Image (cartoon, grey):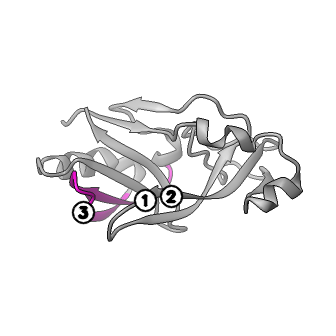
């Protein structure tokens, strides 16, 4: 089995949004939402589904900034999230319960492969993709809504 790490997003770029009023958030195209269901509001920093009653920010995030595969999509961030989730050789529950689209990229940011997997089967897909030594990293997306979920790196 390939050693891997699943990373949540660095919380620093979102910190200046925490506590802003609705008008200031709207000026930045960010929406504050109260969590009404669990699962349903997956925080991309902590890699956990937010708890009912918590506040999350819905915003557009650029997860691949350059090249022909440049991508951006809506994500949720728990308001006040300060520590990025990090999972070594483990699949966070947030990913394990969802159908995922996983995309493999080389060091130049070119997609080399892609497939769908149920989150519980993710380790098999990670092994398959990382068996190709040209694969530098993987991006997991929620298959149903297409949102960026997490980056997966070879350790």
Q: Quadrant of the N terminus?
A: top left
Is 138 positioned to the left or the right of 55 in the image? left
Provide the secondary structure element on which disc 1 rests.
loop
- Which residue in the protein does label 3 denote? 110
Mark 1 nearby-residue class (10 Å; few <14, some 14–19, many ≥20) = few
- Which residue in the protein does label 1 denote? 65
Q: Are dots 2 and 1 in contact, CB under 8 Å?
A: yes
Q: How many marks?
A: 3
In 3D space, how far apart are the residues under numbered discs 3 and 2 (Cα atoms)? 16 Å
Is 129 positioned to the left or the right of 45 in the image? left
Q: Position of residue 119 (x, y in %)?
A: 41, 51
Q: Is 56 above or below relative to 112?
A: above
In 3D space, how far apart are the residues under numbered discs 2 and 1 (Cα atoms)? 6 Å
Tell which residue pokes out farthest to the bottom in this image: 68
- Which residue in the protein does label 2 denote? 62
Chief secondary structure of the magenta span? strand
Q: Is 135 above or below relative to 71?
A: above
Provide the secondary structure element on which disc 3 rests.
loop
The residue drawn where x is 64% and y is 30% is: 82
The residue lying toward the viewer, choosing from 67 and 149, is 67
Q: Position of residue 79 (x, y in %)?
A: 74, 40
Among numbered discs 1 and 3, the one appearing first in the sequence: 1
Mark 3 nearby-residue class (10 Å; few <14, some 14–19, many ≥20) = some
Is 89 positioned to the left or the right of 24 in the image? left
The residue drawn where x is 51% and y is 41% is: 9
Q: Are dots 3 and 2 in contact, CB under 8 Å?
A: no
As for residue 116 lying within the magenta part, the answer is: yes
Among numbered discs 3 and 2, the one appearing first in the sequence: 2
Q: Position of residue 33 (x, y in %)?
A: 79, 54
In 3D space, how far apart are the residues under numbered discs 1 and 3 (Cα atoms)? 12 Å
State which region is magenta.
97-117
């Amino acid at each position: 089995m390939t050693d891997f790490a699943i990373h949540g997003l660095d919380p620093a770029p979102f910190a200046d949004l925490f506590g802003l009023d609705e008008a200031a958030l709207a000026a930045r195209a960010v929406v504050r939402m109260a969590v009404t269901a669990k699962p349903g509001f997956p925080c991309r920093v902590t890699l956990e589904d937010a708890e009912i009653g918590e506040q999350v920010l819905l915003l557009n995030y650029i997860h691949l900034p350059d090249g022909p595969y440049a991508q951006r999509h809506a994500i949720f961030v728990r308001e006040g999230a300060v520590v990025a989730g990090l999972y070594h050789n483990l699949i966070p529950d947030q990913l394990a319960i969802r159908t995922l689209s996983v995309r493999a990229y080389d060091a130049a940011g070119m997609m080399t492969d892609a497939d769908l997997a149920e989150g519980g089967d993710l380790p098999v897909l990670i092994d398959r993709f990382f068996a190709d030594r040209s694969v530098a990293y993987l991006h997991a997306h929620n298959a149903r809504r297409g949102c960026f979920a997490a980056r997966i790196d070879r350790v």
